[in-house]
Amino acid sequence: MRYVGIQSQITRNNMKSMLLLAAFPVILLGMIWVFLAIVNYFSNGYYDQAGYFVNQLDEESVNWTFSKIAPWVAIGVGVWFVIAYFSNSKMIQRATGAQPLMRRENPRVYNIVENLCMSCGMDMPKVNVIDDPQLNAFASGIDKNSYTVTVTTGLLDRLNDNELAGVIGHELTHIRNRDTRLLITSIIFVGIISTVLSLVVRMMYNRMWFGGFSNNRNEKGGLSVMMIMFIGAICAGIAYLFISLTRFAISRKREFMADAGGAELCGDPLALASALRKISNDPGLGDVEREDIAQMYIIHPKQMAQGLMAFISGLFATHPSTEERIRILEQF
């Protein structure tokens, strides 16, 4: 099996990035409208002849309120996204404790990266190393000024040169295919919704324990603050679910593509298969337990579960099974 179609993969990932950029505001603004509509429906209405309160949606009022809120939400999210998008490399470096690696510090690793880049005609990315005995590696960055390949000291100590070349080739292929840009876009979107959901849930918690819990309407017939926050939490949760599904737009096929590219770059598919087998025995990254960063690892440590948990996590996995990846590499 030969790695082909890199330009098609780049084009496909660029299109997915644009779709994600378009889908996120649609989902976010859509859930805001739904939230306003639900609150309006349960806060408005009339009493029928039997004296029962009949809820009624005032669409004109909902649309008017939405038109006032939506621009501010769009501006706030846009600023948040831009800051996160262009500062992601520094944020990842701080979270993992990665340090830049120079040729004089480790000529072995630097030369492997340089030779692989020369063989495929790509610019040399930055190389970072994390002082951690576990085995892992990942690529990050959004452009040639921020593209970075990060490896752990455990990986450097326990892989031979051919195996290390296969792993680095895998990460360089992620960069060549623009996988890193697409992944970072989705991570930021999920993070924004996750933060909003966490804030709403925390507000509800504080209200329950310090402000009392009441489902009663207020003096003007509107919903209580607690009920409004509850509706907000439900809407934010639904938005989080939809945004999380955008991760599946970043198909698990990208790992197979990166494996194929890494095998072709290093010229030894069995070396990459051997590296994956060694990494699978001790994947992870010390105390770094952030899911957004773990998605970038060559092997996701939490997706090494067995039995029923493996089946459940596999349904929502960002990586294909390591066994399947090794099986395909050994067929080259």
Image (cartoon, helix red, strand yellow):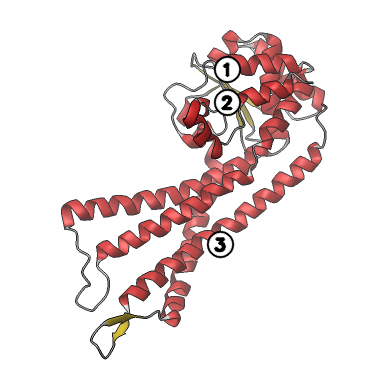
Q: Which residue is mark 1?
A: 279
Mark 3 residue type: Val
The residue identified by callout 3 is 26
Residue 200 on image: x %, y %? 34, 54
Q: Amino acid at mark 1?
A: Ile
Please tell me whether mark 2 sits on a helix, a strand or a loop.
loop
Image quadrant for the N terminus? top right
Can the viewer see residue 175? yes
Which of the two residues, 145 or 12, is positioned nearer the viewer here?
12
Give the labeled residue for mark 2: 299
Left or right: residue 293 versus residue 147 is left
Q: Is residue 245 above or below residue 156?
A: below
At x 43% / y 48%, what residue is drawn? 194
> Of label 1 and label 2, which has the lower sequence position?
1
Earlier sequence position, callout 1 versus callout 3: 3
- Up/down of 331 relative to 185, above or below: above
Give the structural element (helix, strand or loop) at label 3.
helix
